[in-house]
Image: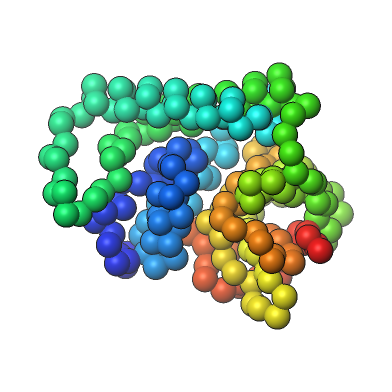
Amino acid sequence: MTLGPDHERWEDAAGAYALNAMPEDECRAFEAHLAECPACRAEAAELRVAAHALPLSAPALLPPPALKARIMAEVEREAALLASASSAPRTEPEKSKRRWSFPRLSAPVMAFACAALIAGVVVGGILFSGGGDGRKVPFESTLPQASAELDVRDDGGATVVANNLPQPDPGKVYMVWIQRPGHAPEPTSALFTPRRDGSATASVTGDLDGVETVLINTEPLGGSTTPTSTPFLVADLT
């Protein structure tokens, strides 16, 4: 698979990105790399699909930022400890080339970290669901049984919360796009598949300033740079 520019710096970052465990500035830089690196984009999409496929008995709810920060710190600490105990020491990177500091996580470590993060976020949402700022924007759906809303936060990010979604065709994934007035839809890094009960969540990071519409369609695994199918969920932010 084709490697994008500066791939060596980011080749170990997909796991942390799938867990939303990156600092904001690193996340923005990695997303810029994803736009140019099919290999990292495919890996990040596969890991996000695995994280979203973990079964949950409680509905997805957004916790307060302070609680989420504590959960993220604990997940990062536990993942780093487990990884360091199960793998050989890594060579210290050159100071002239800054690399993402997370080790490549093994499958058991990744599963543990995903489970810890999602369980913590759900419990936090249940305990503190009364807090949080922002607004909720409903999606218009062309699928009669499907419904979704976009939880737009005051910090500029947003979360898609959907229900009764069908499973995408084999080799396909759902992808979130943003569109500004007079411009073509722009790809985001939000790729997801629904759980067994048809529910799904997807974090839309980046700047939503000036965004008029958020769209969801079906794309090949790894996503696309331009839409290849008609959106079936559309949210109007105006």
Residue 193: image location, x then y, percent: 61, 47
Residue 203: image location, x then y, percent: 60, 46
Q: Residue at horizontal 59%, vertical 25%? A: 67
Residue 132: image location, x then y, percent: 72, 34
Q: Residue at horizontal 32%, vertical 27%? A: 80
Q: Residue at horizontal 61%, vertical 32%? A: 65
Residue lying furthest right in this view? 144
Residue lying furthest bottom in this view? 182
Is 191 on the left or on the right of 3, as rendered? right
Is 50 in front, or is 26?
Answer: 26
Is 37 on the left or on the right of 116, as rendered? left
Q: Residue at horizontal 80%, vertical 46%? A: 136
User: Can I make out residue 59 in this image?
Assistant: no
- Quadrant the C terminus occupies: bottom right
Quarter of the view holding residue 180 = bottom right
Whether 228 is drawn above or below 34: the answer is below
Is 127 in front, or is 187?
Answer: 127
Quarter of the view holding residue 113 = top left
Residue 215: image location, x then y, percent: 70, 62
User: Can I make out residue 208 in this image?
Assistant: yes
Quarter of the view holding residue 131 = top right
- Quadrant the N terminus occupies: bottom left
